[in-house]
Each structure stands twice: as structure tokens, then as C-alpha cells.
Image (spheres, grey):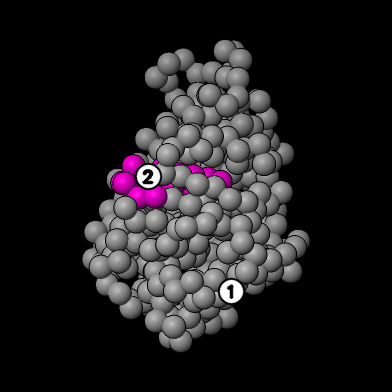
């Protein structure tokens, strides 16, 4: 039984990953600092089932406090075969308002984790990076060999690119085996409440208009959480089978969806006709994210399988357990699409 340390384990992706690792027969130690970006009660809900598993241990720790503090917080007597580092301050927009906090959490925190790994001689790391590092790269789909100098257009993107640079430094100096996994707009049950799909679905339930930033043509490569988690697990197995490896891969769906199409699909899944409220484009947002998955498919056997319609169906099914359904008068008849989108001035 391997023991895997998962940082950010109380989060959206982290809790799904912990469940998958446990199902695969691993022992998991989860770390989270309960950053107040969103409610701790949501994160406690993510952890509830995990805490009942005999092979899961959780500890609250803040990577900003250093390697020694992390070691002191961890349960005694464990030897770790690998780390999956998901902990970070996330989000493009908030990073424009708090750039220093993003550097402190995502860069300094990652440095402290890498130092802990060096000191404890843990040699295998999957690092959660982001499609944001590509910026407004003119070539699509995005390939891992794209030069990313002067591409970051948000502090969040810069912090993730800095994290990739740090993982290479520790690979070079201390023979750390690393997979930098660039995530592409992950969604699904337990998605953070600030993210578009979650926010739009709740607004529809409440009979509120959907804010559309820009002209609605902005496109994202929406990737269902189970597919992302499968890529992480495959990446972990790849590193354990290839000691000393250093690779960077995209974990996307390779099917960008324009914002207006996404809103229509959410409306169909929820059963509510969306009303749009157009607003100016947001600073720091890229025009499109679009993963070239060829490298991940070749190295890891990664193959996303969840369609947007199926992923939204699963998300809405989960959301129905979290919030009261919309009033019947706002719902489309069963099996019937909502009416056409209506702009609101």
C-alpha cells in the first residue's frame, strides 16, 4: 500500500482525487489550510466521507509556514511514496486584486513543500499547474512545447508558471521526478461556488440573469473532474514507473466551448431559460483555452470520456442535493429545451 500526500485535499479536485486514490488501494494523507476564499463548511462537506475511510488521515497545515511546520503537523510514522500538490490560491480575477497573496501561497508555499520533499527524501511529485500559463497564445490547440516567456496575463498565471520553474529546479538539483499537469477549466460535483458553471446554475435556479463578460465568444476547454483525476492518477503511476522523469502535460478535454453555448447547455441541464446581462470583458481573462492532449495520451494513456452534456447532468444532480430546486413555473417541460437566450440591456 503506497502512501500519497495530497495538498489541497479539502478542495473540489482534491477531495475527488483522494477518493480515487483510496478506491485504488492507496493510503492517503490529506493536507489543507482552509483558505477563506470560500466557506470552510463547504470544504468540511467535501471531507466528510473521506474522514470515515480507514486509510485516510487529514491534517490542517499551511505551507506558507515552512517545511518544519508541515512536518510537525503530519501524522507520525508514515513514509510517503509521492505527493500530489493541488493546494493553491485559485482564480484569475481575484489574483488581480491580491497579487501578493497569490505569490505567497502559490510560489512560497510550493517552495516550502519542495523543501519538505527534499528533507524527507520524497522523490515523486505531481504538480497542479493551469492552462492559464498559456495566456493568449496565438497557436491552438495549446501544446506543451509552446514558449511561455512573457505570456502570463494574470498574477495567478504567473504564480503557476513560477511553480513549474521551481519543480524543474528541484528535479535538476535533487533528482525529483515531476509531472506538471496543466488543468483546463475543471467542473463537476463540488465545483467551487465562484466558478462559472456553479454560479450560472445557481443564478438560473434563483431566476436571476446570467452575466456575460465581453461578447460571449470567449471559449473554455471544460474538463470533467473525473477525467482530470484520471489523468492525475495516470501521471502518478507514470512517475513511479519512470524514476527521474520530468514532464509537463495538458489535461484538458480538447473541445473548447464558447460562453454562449455553455450558458445554453447549463440552461438545458437545469431546465431554465437563461436571460443574459452583457458586461465589459474582465482584465486578465484569456480569449480561449484549448488543450492538445496528444502528449498526455501518448505518455499516460489519458483519454477524457465525459461529454459536456453528461458532465452538466452530473453536476446539476449534485447541485439538487445542495439547494432547493427552482420554482416549477420557471422550468421547461421535461425533455424540452429552454427558450432562446434573451439579451438584457
Q: Earlier in the sequence, mark 2 or mark 1?
A: 2
- Extreme residue in the bottom direction: 173
Query: Compared with residue 249, is residue 308 higher up or lower down, i.e. above or below?
Result: above
> For residue 190: magenta?
no
Residue 112 at x, y percent in the picture: 60, 71
Magenta range is: 9-27
Total numbered labels: 2
The residue under the point 30% across, 66% down is 240
Q: State which quadrant residue 207 falls in.
A: top right
Q: Is residue 313 above or below residue 241?
A: above
Figure quadrant of residue 325:
top right
Q: Position of residue 38 (x, y in %)?
A: 68, 45
Asked whether, in this view, residue 245 is left or right of residue 313, the answer is: left
Q: Residue at x 52, y 57 (%)?
A: 76
| Label 2 crowd (10 A; few <14 / some 14-19 / many >=20) | some
Q: Residue at x 41, y 44 (%)?
A: 55
Q: Secondary structure at mark 2?
A: helix
Farthest-out residue, top: 328
Q: Mark 2 and 1 residues: CB-CB less than 8 Å, in contact?
A: no
Residue 36 versus residue 207 in the image, above or below = below
Residue at the disc numbered 2 = 22
Foreground disc of the pair 2, 1: 2
Residue 253 pos. (x, y %) = 37, 53
Q: Main secondary structure of the magenta part?
A: helix
Q: Can residue 284 be seen by looking at this rendering? A: no
To which residue does mark 1 refer?
111
The residue sitting at 50% across, 18% down in the picture is: 332
Q: Quadrant of the C terminus?
A: top right
Amino acid at each position: 500500500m503506497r502512501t500519497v500526500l495530497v495538498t489541497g485535499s479539502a478542495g473540489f479536485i482534491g477531495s475527488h482525487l483522494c477518493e480515487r486514490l483510496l478506491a485504488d488501494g492507496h493510503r492517503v494523507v490529506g493536507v489543507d489550510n482552509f483558505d477563506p476564499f470560500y466557506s470552510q463548511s463547504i470544504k468540511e462537506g467535501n471531507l466528510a466521507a473521506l474522514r470515515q475511510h480507514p486509510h485516510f488521515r487529514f491534517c490542517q497545515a499551511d505551507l506558507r509556514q515552512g517545511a518544519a511546520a508541515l512536518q510537525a503537523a503530519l501524522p507520525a510514522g508514515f513514509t510517503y511514496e509521492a505527493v500530489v500538490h493541488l493546494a493553491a490560491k485559485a482564480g484569475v480575477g481575484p489574483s488581480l486584486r491580491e497579487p501578493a497573496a497569490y505569490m505567497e501561497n502559490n510560489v512560497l508555499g510550493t517552495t516550502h513543500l519542495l523543501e519538505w520533499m527534499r528533507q524527507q527524501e520524497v522523490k515523486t511529485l505531481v504538480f497542479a499547474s493551469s492552462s492559464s500559463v498559456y495566456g493568449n497564445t496565438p497557436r491552438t490547440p495549446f501544446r506543451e512545447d509552446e514558449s511561455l516567456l512573457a505570456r502570463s496575463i494574470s498574477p495567478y498565471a504567473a504564480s503557476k508558471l513560477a511553480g513549474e520553474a521551481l519543480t524543474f529546479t528541484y528535479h535538476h538539483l535533487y533528482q525529483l521526478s515531476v509531472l506538471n499537469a496543466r488543468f483546463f477549466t475543471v467542473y463537476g460535483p463540488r465545483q467551487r461556488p465562484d466558478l462559472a458553471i456553479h454560479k450560472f446554475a445557481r443564478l438560473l435556479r434563483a431566476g436571476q440573469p446570467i452575466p456575460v463578460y465581453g461578447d460571449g465568444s470567449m471559449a473554455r476547454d471544460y474538463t470533467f473532474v473525473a477525467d482530470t483525476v484520471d489523468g492525475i492518477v495516470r501521471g502518478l503511476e507514470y512517475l513511479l514507473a519512470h524514476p527521474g522523469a520530468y514532464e509537463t502535460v495538458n489535461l484538458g478535454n480538447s473541445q473548447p466551448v464558447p460562453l454562449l453555448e455553455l450558458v445554453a447547455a447549463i440552461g438545458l441541464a437545469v431546465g431554465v431559460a437563461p436571460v443574459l446581462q452583457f458586461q465589459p470583458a474582465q482584465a486578465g481573462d484569456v480569449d480561449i483555452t484549448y488543450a492538445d492532449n496528444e502528449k498526455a495520451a501518448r505518455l499516460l494513456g489519458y483519454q477524457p470520456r465525459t461529454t459536456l452534456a453528461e458532465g452538466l447532468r452530473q453536476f446539476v444532480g449534485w447541485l439538487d442535493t445542495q439547494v432547493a430546486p427552482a420554482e416549477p413555473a420557471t422550468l421547461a417541460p421535461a425533455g424540452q429545451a429552454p427558450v432562446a437566450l434573451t439579451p438584457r440591456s
